[in-house]
Each structure stands twice: as structure tokens, then as C-alpha cells.
Amino acid sequence: MTISYKGSCLAAIGRGGREAWAEMAQHEVAFPVTDPAELLKLRAGDEVIVQGHVIGIRDRTQIRIFDQGQEPPMDLAGAFLLHTAPNVRKVGPGRYEKICIGTTTSARMVRFTEGLGERYGVRAICGKGGFPDEAIEPMQRLGMVYFAIVGGAAALETTQIEEIEEVAWEELMPECLWKFRVRDFGPLIVGIDAHGGSLYRDVQDRAARKLEELYARL
């Protein structure tokens, strides 16, 4: 795994109802990671471009692993998991070409987070809509991160996937396990970092304070 600092940009972060300017780092990350400690360089709000390999996964795949007790047929150590059920075309036995590979909402799959990290060594999860606060503690304890991706950007994401290298559990189509080789995948935003930082929690906290201010004026 490699992480290289690519520079920085300024992002507006609300604090106590005011806008403050903070530096947002930009990184390039290769997966699967070989040194989990490297993920500690990422902070919530940072921008990330991903190289290497991404594993596609969705509800039925994880239900099979955790609820039905079947071991995954792919090595997930150090992996980046993308919540997806891709649109593909079969071109031969076990061989598929991409048509459109987008993402799905992550929140309903949050219950699998701890097991993925603790039992299988997964280090990054990515999808739409973010993870609820219950994901923060296990992700911090296990050195995991959650990457946010822009919803509706499937056409762009598909161009950043160079090849579908492997597929497992085809009978679950399209909710199989997929191994994608990617190049310049992103940009992604670190939504939850391995230090317990969460953009989603921060937004909720700011919204709650703003509501209190509005109610106080009534």
C-alpha cells in the first residue's frame, strides 16, 4: 500500500454556526493495504484517489457470510469494499465486462462492519449515504475507514474501473463478490476515519445546534 500527500485545498467547516476554513489533505491510496497503520494518515474530510483493487459486495453476499456461515471465497485482508450490484455483460465462463458500476446505500449494511474488520481484515468500506454513529467505535478500534462517494456518478466510476478480474458466488448475481482493478478511482471523501472522526456525526451535531437556535427565536 502507498499513500502519498498530493497537496491540500481549503474546505469550509461549520463550527458553532459559523464558517471556518480548514485545510483538507489529498491522498493517493493503493489497495489492498499491507500496513494498516498507514490509514491513520487519513482524517475525516480528506480527499482520496484509490489505485489497485476494489472488492464489490452487497447485502446478499454479507448475509451469506455472516448469517449463513459461509467463508468468503476471496481474500479480504486489507481490502477496500464497494457497496455495489453492478450492471455487467457475460462474455465467457466466469468472465464479465462492465456496463455500469455504481454504488448503493451503505447504512443498511452497517451491522456487518465489525465482523468484516475483525474476522477478515477489511480496512475500507465505500458507498452512498454514509454510516450511522454505531460504525464509529468498531472502525476506530479496528483501524478502518469509510469512504463517501458521490451518488449518481456511476458513469464516471465505471470509467475508472479498468477490468473485472474475478467474480465469486455467481448464483447471487448481481450481488456477487466482484474483484475490480481500478485506476484513479474517485475522488472519494473520508467520511469516517480510524481516529473516531465522522463527517456525518459532525453534520448532525451542527444541525441540532442550528435547530436549537431556531427554536429559541420562536
Image: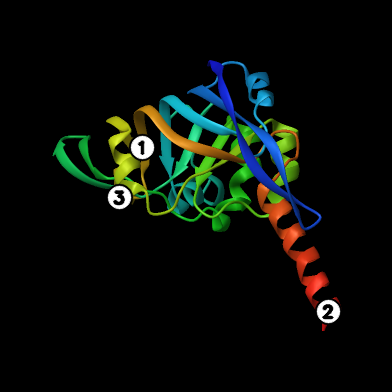
Q: Position of residue 25 (x, y in %)?
A: 61, 28
Residue 190 picture location, percent across and down? 60, 38
How crowded pointer 2 is (Cα within 10 Å; few <14, some 14-19, many 20+) is rated as few
- C-alpha distance separating marks 3 and 2: 54 Å
Q: Is residue 160 left or right of residue 203?
A: left
Q: Amino acid at mark 2?
A: Arg
Q: At label 3, which amino acid type do we have? A: Met
| 21 displayed left or right of 154 | right
**Residue drawn at x 78%, y 75% as measured from the top left:** 214
Is residue 150 positioned above or below 125 on the image? below
Q: How many marks?
A: 3
Q: Is residue 164 visible?
A: no
In-image side of 158 versus 195 (left or right): left
- Are the residues at dot 1 and dot 3 in contact (C-beta closer than 8 Å)? no
The answer to which quarter of the image holds residue 45 is top right
Name the spot of residue 181 as percent of width and height, x first: 34, 27
For disc 3, the marked residue is 173
Image position of 152 with respect to 4: above or below: below
Query: For numbered disc 3, what is the local secondary structure?
Result: loop
Q: Earlier in the sequence, mark 3 or mark 2?
A: 3
Pointer 3: residues within 10 angstroms few (<14), some, or many (20+)? some
Residue 41 visible in the current orientation: yes
Residue 197 image position (x, y, % from top left): 73, 41
Judging by the rendered image, the residue that carries numbered circle 1 is 178
Q: Please give left or right for residue 128 compared with residue 100 in the image.
A: right
Hey, which residue is sitting farthest bottom in the picture?
218
Q: Nearer the viewer, residue 72 or 44?
A: 44
Look at discs 3 and 2 and give the one toward the viewer.
2
Query: What residue is disc 2 on?
Result: 217
**Alpha carbon of mark 1 to alpha carbon of mark 2: how far?**
53 Å
First-in-chain label (1 vs 2)? 1
